[in-house]
């Protein structure tokens, strides 16, 4: 139901202008929930019903300006007109429609029960999130490797430089003299610590494959041809502030599962059930 109501609300600009509606200024203060804000034939729409609809829209879309409230009310009026049209057509007595309504009723009741007995109970405290972090710090570590490189335009240049390095030439001096990556060349080719996902795959693969101090073969990337020298490895632990939302979500899902299973087990123990699986065939 909510899906088509949202769609209906989106059509208000095109079709809502033909509905007559009183343009009285609202009374000062918060209206009473029972105050009638619209009427369709003999059916009344109250401020309480309107407010619940408004709050639903705001949960999904964010704050809505008061000048948009009229459109929401128009949508509720159109919904009531359609509902009365369905009743006039006898759809509320149609067997297939009744079955769908019953299924919707069951679903709403189940959702509300779980909301109150599971979701409202399964909450995560600051202490629980912090404890999870402190006891599992390695899970929040990021592996890094220090790396330096020399980049040139052609493979021939790169191969020649690699031969010089293998003959004992200083990496930093050759980087300063020949690398076309000017930002790192000034620092002797130093790129600093690299983490997974920070650079192109072919470059990253070699950086993490090499042992400390080892030279790579010539690497071709979209930027040119590189010789890479690997440095020290380290594991950097992310601060709690950077991962606390992920921790909370993980703990919340775990708590919700555990709370649901305990709640379901208790209900099943108190219920008398019979399964006739042989009758399924």
Image (cartoon, rainbow, N blue to C red):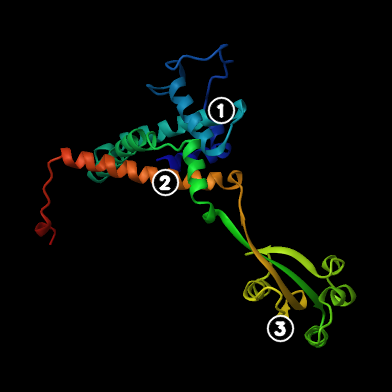
Note whether 152 is above or below 73 in the view shown. below
Residue 273 in the image, given as x and y percentages of width and height: 13, 45
Answer whether residue 132 is visible to the viewer in this image: yes
Q: Nearer the viewer, residue 155 or 54?
A: 155
Return the disc, 1 or 2, that comes first in the chain's sequence.
Answer: 1
Return the disc, 3 or 1, that comes first in the chain's sequence.
Answer: 1
| Mark number displayed over residue 85 | none
| Mark number displayed over residue 69 | 1
| Mark number displayed over residue 217 | 3
Q: Nearer the viewer, residue 172 or 217?
A: 172
Mark 3–mark 2 distance (CA, rounded to whole Å) = 46 Å
- Farthest residue toward the top? 28
| Mark number displayed over residue 253 | 2
| Horizontal side, residue 87 vs residue 65: left or right | left
Answer whether residue 11 is visible to the viewer in this image: no
Label pair 3/2, CB-CB below 8 angstroms: no
Q: Secondary structure at mark 1?
A: helix
Mark 3–mark 1 distance (CA, rounded to whole Å) = 66 Å
Residue 223 in the image, given as x and y percentages of width and height: 77, 74
Q: Secondary structure at mark 3?
A: loop
Q: Quadrant of residue 183?
A: bottom right
| Horizontal side, residue 100 vs residue 164: left or right | left
Q: Bin the neighbour count of mark 3 within 10 Å (Cα to Cα): few under 14, some 14-19, many 20 and up.
A: some
Q: Secondary structure at mark 2?
A: helix
């Amino acid at each position: 139901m909510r899906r088509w109501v949202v769609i209906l609300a989106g059509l208000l600009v095109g079709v809502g202008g033909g509905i007559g509606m009183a343009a009285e200024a609202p009374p000062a203060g918060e209206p009473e929930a029972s105050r009638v804000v619209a009427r369709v034939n003999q059916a009344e729409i109250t401020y309480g019903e309107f407010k619940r609809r408004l709050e639903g829209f705001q949960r999904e879309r964010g704050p809505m300006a008061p000048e948009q409230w009229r459109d929401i009310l128009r949508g509720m009026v159109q919904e009531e007109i359609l509902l009365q049209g369905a009743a006039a057509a006898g759809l509320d007595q149609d067997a297939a429609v009744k079955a769908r309504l019953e299924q919707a009723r069951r679903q709403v009741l189940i959702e509300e029960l779980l909301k109150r007995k599971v979701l409202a109970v399964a909450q995560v405290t600051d202490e629980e999130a912090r404890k999870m972090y402190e006891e599992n710090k390695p899970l929040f570590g990021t592996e890094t490797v220090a790396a330096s490189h020399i980049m040139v335009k052609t493979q021939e240049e790169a191969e020649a430089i690699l031969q010089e390095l293998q003959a004992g030439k200083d990496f930093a001096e050759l980087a300063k003299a020949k690398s076309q990556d000017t930002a790192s060349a000034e620092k002797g080719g130093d790129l600093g610590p690299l983490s997974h996902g920070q650079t192109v795959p072919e470059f990253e693969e070699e950086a993490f494959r090499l042992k400390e101090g080892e030279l790579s073969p010539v690497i071709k990337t979209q930027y040119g041809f590189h010789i890479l020298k690997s440095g020290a490895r380290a594991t950097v632990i992310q601060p709690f502030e950077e991962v606390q939302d992920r921790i909370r979500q993980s703990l919340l899902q775990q708590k919700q599962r555990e709370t649901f299973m305990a709640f379901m087990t208790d209900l099943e123990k108190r219920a008398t059930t019979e399964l006739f699986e042989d009758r399924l065939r």
